[in-house]
Image (cartoon, rainbow, N blue to C red):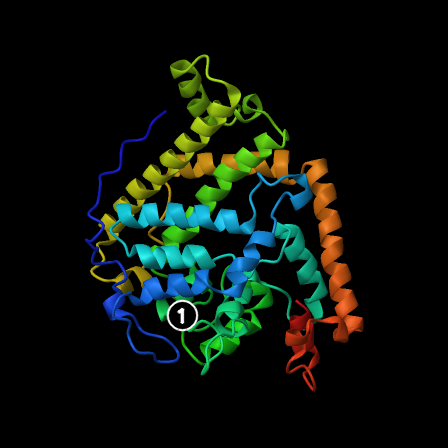
Amino acid sequence: MRAAPVAMIDPHRRAVYACDPAQSRGRLHPEPASKARSPFRRDCDRIIHSTAFRRLKHKTQVFVFDEGDHYRTRLTHTLEVAQVARALARALALDEDLAEALALAHDLGHPPFGHAGERALEECLRAFGGFDHNAQTLRVVTALERHYPTFDGLNLTWETLEGLVKHNGPLTDRDGRPVERYRIHGIPGTIRDYIRRQDLQLWSFASVEAQVAAFADDIAYDAHDIDDGLRAALFTLDDIAVVALPGRILADIRAEFPTLDPSRTVHEFIRRLIGLLIEDLVAQTRRNLAALAPRSGDDVRNAPSGVAGFSPAIAEAERSIKGFLQTRMYRHARVQRVMNEAAGVVRDLFGRYAEHPGDLPAEWQEGLAGADDPARARRRR
């Protein structure tokens, strides 16, 4: 099964609905413009050189280090998301640097051990406002990174910050009432505090660049989790062939290359899956944009719904892939055992630092004297 090819786009052409770096809403702390780099390119470079970005290499998601060095970490996942995001941005005549910046930073707030680590931290911080990885990403890039002489954080552009916070859609309605998953617990304190300094318009959608970066995350997950699951022998190619879209792709490969060895079959399958998902997303997003007919990036932000998305058929197929992985990989007994142990490590470390804050690294203890309990708890994070 092959999707129609995506027409090539001049990388120097920018659509009217794309974010124009020359029209950026700027940074919280004004800085002189660079003569050589756009504001969004500078954001990319600042993220790559950050401490939090380097730490991604030690953060695992499904498999831990002693299971082998061929499995993805948050760092390798992030690089794959950035590659897909740039491909999507180029095909849609968006700003590639902004899409890349959002992809590079999207996981900076995640703890180790994937969702297991996040659930453990949520449990530990329940009495102090809970844990939200998007809010933690904002905290990392606006406060925790400390490199510059006159401000904390990376001082990223407004467009990058809004994309990190809102890439999955608005957090509030126009009256400030939380929506979707924020209805129950409200907007995380980190985000509430920050928007008092710089309004990120939580009621609106983010840029097209942010929306496609979010889908790049989904595409990368689907592809590399299948690859890792096959490598770990949690399931076989024949197992995943029962899912409609993977089954059709595998049937095409086997018909075209009947004697292809299994490892090359897997590589060709992953290649075709990524290509098909990218091509469908580009085609459907173009249709959505044509229907909306935006004349600016703000028209996209003010739209009644997001503009990036898969076609209905591929959206259903993609949900089926996620359903397969949920059952056959994420809930696999072997994975569950390791993740339960990993969550225990997070809880134990939190408890240790709660009882013995002097065990924290010296730089983490700075400013803790006299801090309230929530501030102390979040420092232990």
Which one is nearer the viewer's eye here, 133 or 381? 381
Q: Which residue bears the numbered disc 1?
A: 156
In the rendered view of the protein, which quadrant contains the C terminus?
A: bottom right
Q: Residue at x 49, y 65 (%)?
A: 50
In the rendered view of the protein, which quadrant contains the N terminus?
A: top left
Percent x, y of residue 16: 20, 58
Which one is nearer the viewer's eye here, 12 or 285? 12
Instruction: Determine which quarter of the picture holds residue 282.
Output: top left
Residue at the far bottom in the pictured view? 370
Query: On the rendered structure, is 35 left or right of 131?
Result: left
Q: Residue at x 37, y 34 (%)?
A: 276
In the displayed structure, 188 sits above or below 207; it is: below
Percent x, y of residue 297: 27, 62
Which one is nearer the viewer's eye here, 85 or 170? 85
Q: Residue at x 42, y 20 (%)?
A: 253
Q: Is residue 360 visible?
A: yes
- Amino acid of disc 1: Leu
Query: On the rendered structure, is 255 left or right of 74?
Result: left
Percent x, y of residue 351: 78, 66
Q: Is residue 215 visible?
A: no
